[in-house]
Amino acid sequence: MAAVELSQIHKRFGGTQVLRGIDLDIRDGEFIALVGPSGCGKSTLLRLLAGLESVSQGRIAIGGRDVTELDPKDRDIAMVFQNYALYPHMTVAANMAFSLEHRGAPRAQIDERVAWAAQILGLSALLERYPRQLSGGQRQRVAMGRAIVRDPQVFLFDEPLSNLDAGLRIVMRSEIKALHRRLGTTMVYVTHDQVEAMTMADRIVVLNAGRIEQAGAPLELFDRPANRFVAGFIGSPAMNFLPGRCAAHGFETEGGLLPLSPGLPAAAFGRPASYGVRPEHFERCGAGEGVGAQVRSVEPLGSDTQLTLRVGDTDVVALFHERMSPAPGDMLHLRPRAENVHLFDAQSGQRL
């Protein structure tokens, strides 16, 4: 186990700058998720940690040791890839043992470590099978087993669940989290799925265009996003944004007047802003209250109903924890819960 320090990390590929001054301290034993849109630099950052790419500028330390210029084999890390990267001609046991054999470990130690990892991951009955005889979830377990037999200081995961179906992803999320609790090893996990990040990580790092937008506990990012980008990225369905202006009596928007949360700084009033409200924070109200919203589509989800509605010139999504059956074209009146409202500067996108 080890802490990881990234100091002013820059990465350029020719004339293209992918990472721009990344500073990040990862605590010993912490589970960190790197999230962001495609091309934001999260996989590149993971590859720099692994030593698979060289740093253009900056410093990487693992366990207090500068590893910036070290080869991958000398960093004491293990990486689990998206495509499993198993040797098809080797059995499960041979795949898991390969790295230890390559290091010249004693046979007894190799067998002991493989049996230990197989027991943790539920692979003991599959050790003599080949990858082609395994399901996707079993192959991913083998890939994780190959990593944990080495007992590295840091585990790196590069979108390990993206090739699995939705149901299996849920199961594997729980298994990886349980593995982290059992081993207590530092883990850095790259994913494009913010639900994975929310449910698994101790801390989420949101990247955008090569920079860190915000890092914090999952609920911290959900409840107090630092800017509009983070607010729109964290949460599913995504946060709604309505353009308008803060006034003393509420938020003036094209669809009507919306409530403001108490304690808004004086500097916020009178300036253009984006009014952020999550789909689950709308409530229905009577005519003459809230804002009028025309139903565009209805998605029944069993116990919940998701509506797409038109407020002024803006489409919003509202999620109600009840069964509803309005028809497209119907008018509803909605009111956001004032305590759950988020306001962002219209120009900078920063939280007000």
Image (spheres, rainbow, N blue to C red):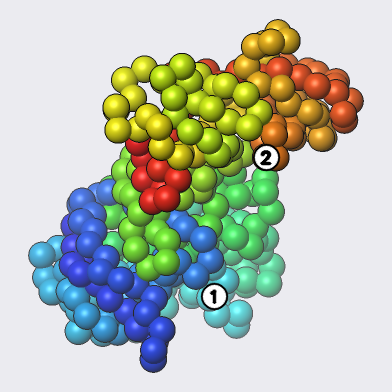
Q: As displayed, is residue 199 above or below residue 116?
A: above
Give the residue drawn at x 44%, y 24%: 247
The quadrant of the picture occupied by the N terminus is: bottom left
For marks 1 and 2, give the CA distance: 48 Å
Numbered label attached to residue 86: 1
Q: As displayed, is residue 276 above or below residue 227?
A: above
Q: As displayed, is residue 239 above or below residue 25?
A: above
Residue 116 % position (x, y):
38, 56
Amino acid type assigned to the residue bearing label 2 in the image: Thr
Give the residue drawn at x 46%, y 16%: 249
Q: How many discs appear?
A: 2
Give the residue drawn at x 10%, y 65%: 64
**Around disc 1, counting alpha carbons within 10 Å, would you say few (fewer than 14), some (14 to 19), or many (20 or more)?**
many
* For residue 323, side relative to residue 166 (left or right): right
Of circles 1 and 2, the one toward us is 2
Amino acid type assigned to the residue bearing label 1 in the image: Leu
* For residue 125, side relative to residue 298 (left or right): left
Residue 331 % position (x, y):
80, 21
* For residue 314, side relative to residue 8 (left or right): right
Q: Which of 158 and 230 is in front in this view?
A: 230
**Do we see residue 205 in this rendering?**
no
Numbered label attached to residue 314: 2
**Do we see residue 19 in this rendering?**
yes
Q: Which of 271 and 25 is in front in this view?
A: 271
Element class at badge 2: strand
